[in-house]
């Protein structure tokens, strides 16, 4: 084995074992929060496509300026935001005595692996309930019947060892009329 | 003794299987940086602390370590053998539920109660094998009638549990003491457990070559339908951007893990 082969072969093997393409997807809108105040909201997730093995993308985060985290995740029946007992209240005002009820979903998608750049609609029909440990009032986007529409952008990087995806920072808490 | 909701949060980090000694475990710095990075403009005072138990494990393994050094004649062979013993020994201690495991649990419980005594809300972030100890100690504390009044989180020494790359779904770590989580009884406060896992993390799946783990649930089988249980348990499948063993150590600086921790400790 010559020197070139001795160098290239291990790198090739390493690349095959751990090399990945990483995609980051993101979209932003400004819309009223659960108090009716317009806020910036950012939706984002990543997908890793390894050279060997299946691609993975299972969870999207929706963060709102001055607000709380909403998680849309792959489940058997689609990409769903599952409400938490003690935290989420349905639009109907029904109290949450059980856990895991649906608070929203990505429309027309069975998995985040199906989602690429372009328009994406999601629903949200819960409002959060603050508690004595909340350091600021809990807010989501306003719960409503009609879906929110995001325009999703895609970016791609490639790495020999894989790389933790660079996801957008939390939207800054800037509000009109100084409301927090 | 009671927790003061307005006090600074303490995020207590429990490391997993490691080589080296206590001084090598500095993952609290990564968690501190991760939280600050994902807090944005949320006003929060907190500190990240480390619970270290590598020296307890190393002490228990000292006799075997000397034996391995004798058997592995060359310096390089001795080094590799010692590292292997360090890792395997950590797992065996937890798996067999040895006196070493008991000592580690007692020490973690003591650390948590020290934080409780000063009234700071405490949140556990446990990686890998550390999640076994964290899970056991939380459940032990729940069985103590002095804590975890379901009507008031002020009586909770631990406000929430975050596990990263946990082997708790593996059959080898199932035991009578882990058959179910401790029920909190009647009330309207809920104990939150977030379990982050990557599909190719071999410590989660038990598939040593990192084949993808299908499905969605790793620890959610602990969730019962009864509102008396009082737990909200969520498996969160995180795409770490890495595969195989690299995925197992990629949780520490992942933004989505940071988002989850921030959401938990600010509420």
Image (cartoon, rainbow, N blue to C red):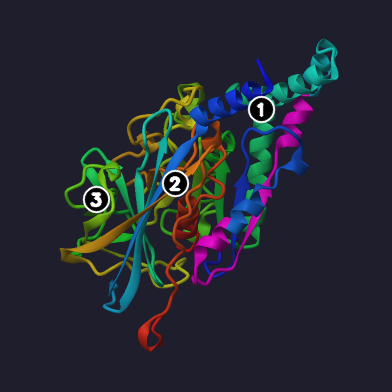
Left or right of A18, for residue B24: right
Q: Which of marks 2 and 1 is in front?
A: 1
Q: Which residue is drawn at 54% across and 69% down?
A: B44
Q: Residue at x 38, y 81 (%)?
A: A175
> Which residue was labeled with disc 1?
B90
Q: Read off the chain for label 3.
A: A
Residue B226 visible to an observer of this rendering:
no
Asked where in the image residue A36 lies, by quadrant, the reply is bottom left
Q: Give the range drawn in magenta.
A: B34-61
> Which residue was labeled with disc 3?
A101
For the residues beneath circles 2 and 3, the answer to whether they share a chain is no
Q: Are marks 3 and 1 in contact (CB under 8 Å)?
A: no
Q: Does the magenta segment cover residue B45?
A: yes
For the residues beneath circles 3 and 1, the answer to whether they share a chain is no
Asked where in the image residue A174 lies, by quadrant, the reply is bottom left
Q: Does the magenta segment cover residue A131?
A: no
Q: Which residue is drawn at 39% across and 72% down?
A: A137
Q: Read off the chain for label 1.
A: B
Q: Residue at x 60, y 27 (%)?
A: A8
- In the rendered view of the protein, which quadrant contains the C terminus of chain B? bottom left
Q: How far apart are marks 3 and 1 (CA)?
A: 39 Å
Q: Read off the chain for label 2.
A: B
Observer-nearest of B51 and A133: B51
Observer-nearest of A100 and B202: B202
For the residues beneath circles 2 and 1, the answer to whether they share a chain is yes
> Which residue was labeled with disc 2?
B193
In percent of width and height, residue B238 lies at: 42, 43
Q: Do the residues labelled 2 and 1 touch (CB within 8 Å)?
A: no
């Amino acid at each position: 084995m010559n020197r070139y082969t001795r160098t290239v072969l291990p790198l090739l093997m390493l690349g095959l074992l751990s090399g990945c393409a990483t995609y980051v997807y993101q979209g932003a809108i400004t819309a009223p929060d659960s108090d009716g105040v317009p806020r910036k909201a950012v939706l984002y997730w990543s997908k890793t496509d390894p050279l060997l093995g299946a691609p993975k993308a299972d969870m999207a985060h929706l963060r709102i300026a001055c607000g709380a985290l909403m998680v849309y995740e792959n489940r058997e029946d689609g990409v769903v935001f599952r409400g938490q007992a003690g935290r989420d209240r349905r639009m109907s005002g029904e109290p949450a005595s059980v856990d895991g009820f649906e608070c929203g979903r990505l429309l027309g998608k069975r998995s985040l692996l199906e989602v690429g750049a372009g328009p994406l609609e999601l629903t949200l029909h819960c409002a959060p309930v603050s508690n004595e440990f909340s350091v600021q009032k809990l807010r989501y986007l306003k719960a409503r019947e009609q879906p929110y529409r995001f325009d999703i952008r895609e970016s791609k990087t490639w790495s020999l060892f894989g790389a933790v995806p660079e996801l957008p920072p939390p939207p800054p808490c800037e509000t009109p009329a100084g409301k927090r | 003794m009671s927790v003061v909701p307005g006090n600074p949060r303490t995020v207590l980090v429990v490391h997993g299987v490691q080589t080296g000694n206590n001084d090598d475990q500095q993952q609290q710095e990564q968690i501190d940086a991760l939280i600050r990075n994902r807090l944005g403009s949320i006003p929060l005072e907190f500190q990240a602390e480390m619970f270290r138990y590598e020296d307890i494990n190393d002490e228990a393994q000292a006799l075997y370590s000397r034996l391995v050094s004798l058997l592995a004649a060359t310096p390089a062979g001795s080094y590799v053998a010692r590292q292997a013993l360090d890792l395997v020994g950590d797992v065996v201690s937890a798996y067999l539920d040895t006196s070493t495991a008991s000592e580690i649990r007692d020490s973690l419980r003591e650390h948590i109660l020290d934080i409780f005594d000063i009234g700071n809300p405490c949140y556990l972030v446990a990686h890998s094998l550390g999640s076994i100890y964290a899970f056991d100690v939380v459940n032990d504390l729940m069985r103590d009638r002095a804590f975890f009044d379901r009507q008031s989180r002020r009586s909770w020494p631990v406000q929430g549990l975050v596990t990263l790359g946990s082997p708790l779904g593996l059959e080898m770590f199932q035991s009578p003491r882990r058959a179910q989580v401790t029920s909190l009884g009647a009330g309207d406060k809920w104990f939150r457990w977030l379990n982050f896992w990557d599909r190719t993390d071999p410590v989660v799946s038990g598939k040593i070559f990192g084949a993808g783990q299908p499905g969605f649930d790793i620890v959610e089988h602990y969730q019962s339908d009864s509102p008396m249980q009082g737990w909200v348990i969520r498996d969160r499948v995180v795409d770490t951007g890495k595969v195989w063993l690299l995925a197992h150590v990629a949780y520490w600086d992942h933004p989505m893990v940071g988002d989850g921790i921030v959401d938990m400790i600010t509420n």
